[in-house]
Amino acid sequence: MTFEEILPKLKQGAKIIREGWGGFELYVTLVRGEKYQGSEVTPYFLIKTSDEGFSSFAPTVCDILAEDWRIVEE
């Protein structure tokens, strides 16, 4: 799938991944509805890896143009 095709699914709660990544990446998820010190936090992406837990994720141009996105089944 393209990023444009999978983005609505990510917004609906799906976890996604690219086939072309190395393998230690497990999934990308969207986090929203959080608060910090009583204020709303802007939605953001997290990536779960097998070795470091969660990190912030910002798709690169290559990620946005890729056609190998898929939904992670749990």
Image (cartoon, rainbow, N blue to C red):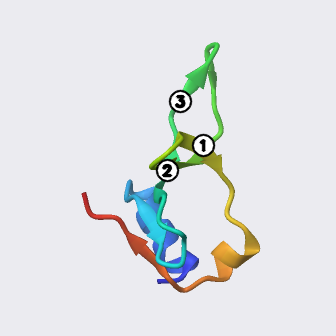
Tell whether 61 sits left or right of 15: right
Q: Residue at x 46, y 83 (%)?
A: 1
> Which marked residue is nearer to the observer: mark 2 or mark 3?
2
Q: Farthest residue in the top direction?
A: 37
Query: Which residue corresponds to mark 2?
Result: 49
> Which marked residue is nearer to the observer: mark 1 or mark 3?
1
Q: Earlier in the sequence, mark 1 or mark 3?
A: 3
Q: CA distance from mark 2 to mark 1?
A: 8 Å
Picture disc at residue 55: 1
Q: Quadrant of residue 62?
A: bottom right
Picture disc at residue 38: none
Circle 2 SS class: strand
Q: Is residue 50 above or below residue 25?
A: above
Tell whether 39 sits left or right of 48: right
Q: CA distance from mark 2 to mark 3?
A: 22 Å
The answer to which of 21 and 73 lies nearer the viewer is 21
Query: Which residue corresponds to mark 3?
Result: 34
What crowding class fits label 3: few (fewer than 14 Cα within 10 Å), some (14-19), or many (20 or more)?
Answer: few
Circle 3 SS class: loop
Is mark 2 in CB contact (under 8 Å) with mark 1?
yes
Q: Residue at x 65, y 73 (%)?
A: 63
Q: Is residue 70 above or below residue 52?
A: below
The amino acid type found where label 3 is placed reads: Glu
Residue 38, image x, y percentages: 61, 14
